[in-house]
Image (cartoon, rainbow, N blue to C red):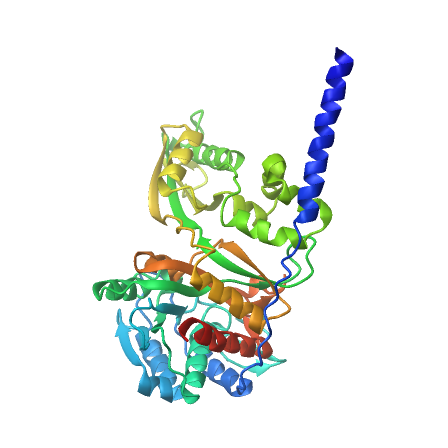
Amino acid sequence: MIKKALLGLVGIILILLIVIVVRTVLNSPDSQLTEKIAPADINVDAAAGRLGEAVRIRTISESRDAPVAAEAFDALHALLDRSYPLVTAQLKKEVIGGHSLLYTWKGSDPSLKPALFMGHMDVVPVEPGTEDQWTHPPYSGKIANGAIWGRGTLDDKLSVLAILEAAEYQLSKGFKPTRTLYFAFGHDEEIGGKNGAGKISAHLKDQGIQLAYTLDEGMVIVQGVMPGIDDPIAFIALAEKGYLTLELTATAVGGHSSIPPRATAVGKISKAIARLEENRMPASLQSPASDMLDTLAPHMPFGLKAVISNRWLLGPVLVGQLGKGGSTNAMVRTTTAATIIAGGSKDNVLPSTAQATVNFRILPGDTIETVTRHVEQVIGNPDVSVSIKQGNNPSRVSSLQSDGYKMIHKTVQEVFPDVLVAPGLMLAGSDSKHYEAVADNSYRFLPMRFGPADIPRVHGTDERIMVDNYGEIIRFYIRLMENAAS
């Protein structure tokens, strides 16, 4: 009896191994190739010079409470008018929210839903005391060592100018779109986008306009970050994580430190943070992270491909491994980050309250409500209150099957034939969230080429874009306009 059971078990294991191997072997790369197109003939050096000029205008978003850099935005608007005379003369331009721009390029077929290409004109400030650490001054717009240097070259003046460079080129060639195209450039994305993208979206809604899709900044072309894949990968984000900041306040009896209570306010708040870090939100693999892995699995070494190709059996193992990483952990769970703690004013005085600020990036599937409830349950202390400082839920997940995604995918393959293309999840936030009510789908991708050393440049020191890559980005938008609007 035992022998028969063992033989049966061995048989089951063999069948499972055969199924795993067959599914892995059959999961091969798509052999369909997109034909490379001849690159558009543009003057990349002149375009780089115009981006450098824009960088020198300090359109800085300091904070939600700080006044808008109105004079700087006026100067940037004037620069764009001068730099792109055909766009200025032939496209409808509206100033919305005081400083944001909306351009309309009317198509010949009103039955086609429009597409909207996005960027933002504001930049984050440079961290005080780090100015001398820059290779070239942060607002110099200097062109040196094959790069354009300064704030906005990665985030996100380059999108604004690259879109306008492409439109100016197409207008010079007499291109006439069949589908209406909108270009939307916000002025306050770095502080939430409420008065920029938020008001542009409301303006479109008031006119009864429903967009086929939007394309904004977000994910990029990366190399050397995906295990087992040497080729560069263009990640087109189908969604972005939500954002939630909670303030925790612990209360206790104050007084002289010589007679402390058993639990102080500082101790309670510290314990609350420790419990949150020890009891993170559960990990799960779902779209779009699952779509990304399914797309890239055929290009991975056999072992990794076997695990991903057989998620029906090995899914828990895969999720467990992803949850141990940094960026991979952020793909499979709502992350928890304690960022500020405060309490007390003197070394011999017990504070009656202590506060902590905790930031969460919410995975699609979770919500502000589910995260807040998780926090309250994990802390489990009535002396620690939880309040919401700010937040927005994660975006919906856009379709892989839409014409918009297919157009973006096709354009990447045509302009970047050396690059693999995969869907992805944007871990940070963008202005795209403001357009969900007026867009069927929203995608987040900008074809900047990133290596591991480039990631800290975004919002950090030595922000810069390589001139050759900037030329590729302009050519990407030129071709995308042809594919999307012809």
Residue beneath the point at 42% across and 65% down: 215
Please tell me whether residue 422 is drawn above or below residue 116 in the rendered image.
above
Q: Is residue 128 visible?
A: no
Residue beneath the point at 30% across and 56% down: 437
- The picture places residue 256, in percent across and down from the top left corner, at 40, 32
Front in this rendered view, residue 161 or 178 = 178
- The picture places residue 485, in percent across and down from the top left corner, at 40, 74
Q: Is residue 424 visible?
A: yes
Front in this rendered view, residue 268 or 160 = 160
Residue beneath the point at 58% across and 48% down: 328
User: Viewed as shown, does residue 259 lie left or right of 308?
Assistant: left
- Quick one: which residue is furthest to the top in this view? 1
Residue beneath the point at 52% across and 55% down: 424
In which quadrant will I find the C terminus?
bottom left
User: Viewed as shown, does residue 131 lie left or right of 63?
Assistant: right
Please tell me whether residue 444 is drawn above or below residue 107 in the rendered image.
above
- Quick one: which residue is furthest to the right in this view? 3
- The picture places residue 226, in percent across and down from the top left corner, at 64, 55
User: Viewed as shown, does residue 341 lie left or right of 421?
Assistant: left
In which quadrant will I find the N terminus?
top right
Please tell me whether residue 415 is drawn above or below residue 301 in the rendered image.
below
- The picture places residue 402, in percent across and down from the top left corner, at 43, 59
User: Viewed as shown, does residue 283 lie left or right of 174?
Assistant: right
Report the number of discs. Answer: 0
